[in-house]
Amino acid sequence: MAHIAIPIPSTPGKQDIEIDVTINGKKHELHYRVELFYWGDCTVPTFDRVECLRQMISQYDQDWSLYYIGAPTDTFVPIAFMRKGDMAIQRQLLTGS
């Protein structure tokens, strides 16, 4: 099993999530961030929401990598990021190497 679902309480604003995982006695720390990106915050008004997201994400903190784009609403889209150094750790954990 490569995934475990953990419910995250829905709160307004940015959510910084730190997860300590111990697998076969080895401890790993993973860092995620979930933010709501509001369509009204697009710098260039457009009907193309993909272009809007591309612009907002391109200006995001470069220490974080895009991890997951959630289901959009008429008002916002939730986006999860993972700290860049943690991507390699997660890849290792998933592949077992």
Image (spheres, rainbow, N blue to C red):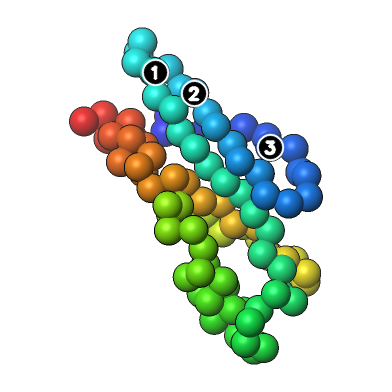
Label drawn at residue 73: none
Q: CA distance from mark 2 to mark 3?
A: 15 Å
Q: Residue at x 21, y 30 (%)?
A: 97
- Kindly identify which residue carries mark 2: 20
Q: Nearer the viewer, mark 2 or mark 3?
A: 2
Q: On screen, 36 above or below 58?
A: above
- Quadrant assignment for the N terminus: top left
Q: Which residue is mark 1?
A: 27
Residue type, numbered disc 1: Lys
Badge 3 element = loop
Q: Position of residue 23 (x, y in %)?
A: 39, 18
Is residue 91 in sight in this rendering?
no
Identify the mark nearer the N-term, 2 or 3.
Answer: 3
Q: Which residue is mark 3?
A: 8
**Dot in front, 1 or 3:** 1
Identified by mark 2, the residue type is: Asp
